[in-house]
Image (spheres, rainbow, N blue to C red):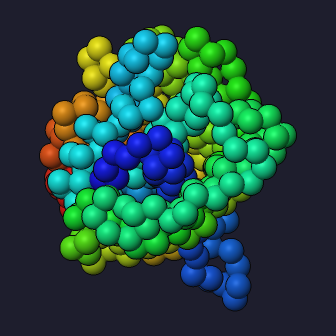
Amino acid sequence: MQFADKQALSSLSLAVLMALSGALVGCGGDGDDGGADPFLTDLDISAANSETVAHATAASVFAFSGAGGAVPLNSGSGVSALGTSARVSHHAASGSSAAWLPQRVVDALKGAIRTDRAQPLAVTASPPQACAVAGTMTVTVDDRDNSGEFSLGDSISVAFSNCQDSTQEVLNGAATVVVTRIGATVLPSFGARMRLTQLSQEAADGRHGIAATGDVVLDYEQTSASSEKTTLTADGNVELKVHTHQNYSDTVTLHPGFGQQSFYESGPGITRINAYGLFSSAAAGGRVVVEPLRTIEIADTEFYPMSGTVKVAGQGSLVLTVLSSTSVQIDLDADGDNSYESRQTQTWDWLF
């Protein structure tokens, strides 16, 4: 799934959307024990639910990042706001929900903060803009302090209506970003609070889909002309409804504090990701904690990660080990004795 490059405002809105969309993984729940909250119950991970847990883990770990980060390009004074285009096109070709990139929001904000162009005062909504293939996108800029430039407290909202920027995916829903911090201008850094409202991305062929609702806190820092660091943290419960062609459908909830840090270096073209915190799976019926055992690494030239290991633990645990950019190993330790009762290898397309 991809969002084709647009000019300025267009690209900005897409970014906001994607960031937000990517940034969440959602709610869910099926109640048990007469109304008891299943999200307060540590999941008993077993052979019966291990595949469901594996799918939910992929959704939680990669919802913030998609299957890759930004592609910073030196544009004289810093990272280009259109840097993700080449990478996202790979996801579009694969039709995978792994194309959810919060980095889109980061890129949009970088462009807005760094630009010298004057912005209209107060609240200005653009007319609906045609998406590249079909549908529309509407962007609203709220210049809260009437400064005529992007500053603290300003917000950008974007709404999609059956928007197709490629023939592989369809976007609907809305996202809003409010800037909470602006740092240095030579190497930009900023913070923002993001809200997603039924922001959804569906593969046109129905193989993958994701819809996000919730609030996320973003912290971004460009650490050099060719590197950057992004931290995304769930601010309250973040809900993501996800489905794949493997008859997998779930509502996954990222609990408050669930976070992800990603580091990108344009020299080697590698994004490194660590995700951590609690999430719940409605389909599995409980909560687990995810922790990185080995940093996930994703090359610009690949659809999916090429290395890394994550562990999810409740009552028992599951370890997902990246074997290559096409396959993943899934190990189950149902009784928590640090030995595996089962092991299977699956493709990324099967997992996410």
Drawn side of residue 86 relative to residue 214, left or right: left
**Residue 75 shows up from this direction:** yes
Q: Is residue 339 above or below residue 211?
A: above
Image-quadrant location for residue 305:
top left
The residue nearer to you, when weighing 42 against 339, is: 42
Q: x, y (%) of residue 117?
A: 60, 31
Residue drawn at (47%, 17%) of the image: 78
Q: x, y (%) of residue 286?
A: 55, 68
Q: Is residue 338 above or below residue 251?
A: above
Image-quadrant location for residue 255:
bottom right
- Residue lying furthest bottom: 34
Image-quadrant location for residue 268:
top left
Q: x, y (%) of residue 296?
A: 35, 33
Drawn side of residue 98 relative to residue 173, left or right: left
Q: x, y (%) of residue 183?
A: 69, 20
- For the N terminus, the image quarter is bottom left
Residue drawn at (70%, 85%) of the image: 35
The residue nearer to you, when weighing 314 against 263, is: 263
Residue drawn at (76%, 44%) of the image: 121
The image shows a total of numbered marks equal to 0
- For the C terminus, the image quarter is bottom left
Residue drawn at (38%, 34%) of the image: 82
Q: Is residue 169 above or below residue 111?
A: below
The residue nearer to you, when weighing 14 against 61, is: 14
**Residue 312 shows up from this direction:** no
The residue nearer to you, when weighing 116 against 234, is: 116
